[in-house]
Amino acid sequence: MPRTNSRLSKSQKPEKEFQEIKEELEETRYIMIGTLPYEVGSMARKFVSDYAEENNVKRLTDFISNLINYASKSAFTSPGVSTSARAYCPLCNGGGNDYYVRGFSIPIGLERHLLGHNNSYQCGVMSILLKMAKDRRRDIENGVMHKGLDF
Ligand SMILES: [Zn+2]
């Protein structure tokens, strides 16, 4: 059944629709975190939550380091192709664009993927987590309460 906002004036409808879309975006972002492996999802929730506090560079560095450590547990080598340890991204399960070599080198390749450094395409999940963290920080600074986002 389509939603009707007959009680709202024309000028109120766009504001209400914007608010509904914003809430759906937020819900979708948290559903995305919920699809991550439990340990990775816990790290992601902590990063988004803690980012709103001080020392955000250290929080980002720690998060990246924790993700690389997590990925290292399932690192592999590709004999005959690469001798370096490699792993898939723990956030998006991506493994790079190289047809012959699976996964990202550990730690540098994965770090570049997560941060989007050195002309690397940034991990889409990491990009969303950073947006969530920055939105949350901005909302807290503006006194906006998040509903259902207690970690
Ligand atoms: Zn990724």
Image (cartoon, rainbow, N blue to C red):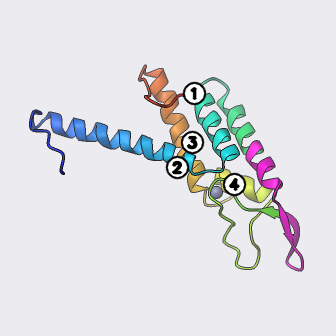
Taking depth in this image into account, of 99 and 91 the one nearest to the observer is 91
Above or below for 103 versus 115: below
> Is tag 1's residue or tag 2's residue first in the polypeptide sequence?
2
Element carrying mark 1: loop
The residue type indicated by label 3 comes to: Leu
> Is tag 3's residue or tag 2's residue first in the polypeptide sequence?
2
Element carrying mark 2: helix
Which region is colored magenta? 66-85
Q: Are marks 3 and 2 in contact (CB under 8 Å)?
A: no
Report crowding for label 3: few under 14, some 14 to 19, many 20 or more residues within 10 A (C-alpha): some
Residue visible at 43% across and 23% down in the picture:
145
* Residue beneath disc 2: 32
> Is tag 1's residue or tag 4's residue first in the polypeptide sequence?
1
Percent of width and height locating residue 95: 69, 66
Report crowding for label 4: few under 14, some 14 to 19, many 20 or more residues within 10 A (C-alpha): many
* Residue beneath disc 1: 52
In this picture, residue 151 sits left or right of residue 11: right
* Residue beneath disc 4: 90
